Amino acid sequence: MTPTQFTFTSAFVLGLTGLTFHRTHLLSALLCLEGMMLALFIALSLWTLQLDSTNYSSAPMLFLAFSACEAGAGLALLVATARTHGTDHLQSLNLLQC
């Protein structure tokens, strides 16, 4: 494993660990998801550069577009949760309640 691969793998694992163990606020969970997406985007970009193929050149931009849509949906969910519940604590959200 090259040092570059190790760096992006450890960045992804760090985001996953933060998502797993630090789930008090919805905003921190969204930030961990964005860190994971950023690590995947950079790794995918470097992978397409190493392959030297034009077939996969649009994949990082498509991935970045989906990541931006995910971030927008997450922020909209955060605003809606903060308006209805008054807080973004994940423990205060009851999924069984309408």
Image: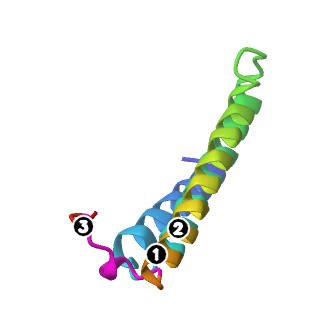
Q: Label 2: few (<14), some or many (≥20) within 10 Å? A: few
Residue at 70% in and 39% down: 65
Labels 3 and 2: the sequence-earlier one = 2
Mark 3 vs mark 2, CA separation in Å: 15 Å
In the structure shown, which secondary structural element does the residue marked by tag 3 occupy? loop
Judging by the rendered image, the residue that carries numbered circle 1 is 84
Q: Which of 83 and 70 is in front in this view?
A: 83
What is the magenta range? 88-95
Identified by mark 3, the residue type is Gln
Judging by the rendered image, the residue that carries numbered circle 2 is 80
- Residue 59 at what x, y percent from top left? 68, 28
In the structure shown, which secondary structural element does the residue marked by tag 2 occupy? helix
Is residue 91 magenta-colored? Answer: yes
Identified by mark 2, the residue type is Ala
Q: Is residue 78 above or below residue 76?
A: below
Residue at 32% in and 74% down: 93
In the structure shown, which secondary structural element does the residue marked by tag 1 occupy? helix
Whether residues under marks 2 and 1 lie with C-beta atoms below 8 angstroms apart, the answer is: yes
Is residue 57 magenta-colored? Answer: no
Q: Considering the image in quadrants, where does the C terminus appear?
A: bottom left
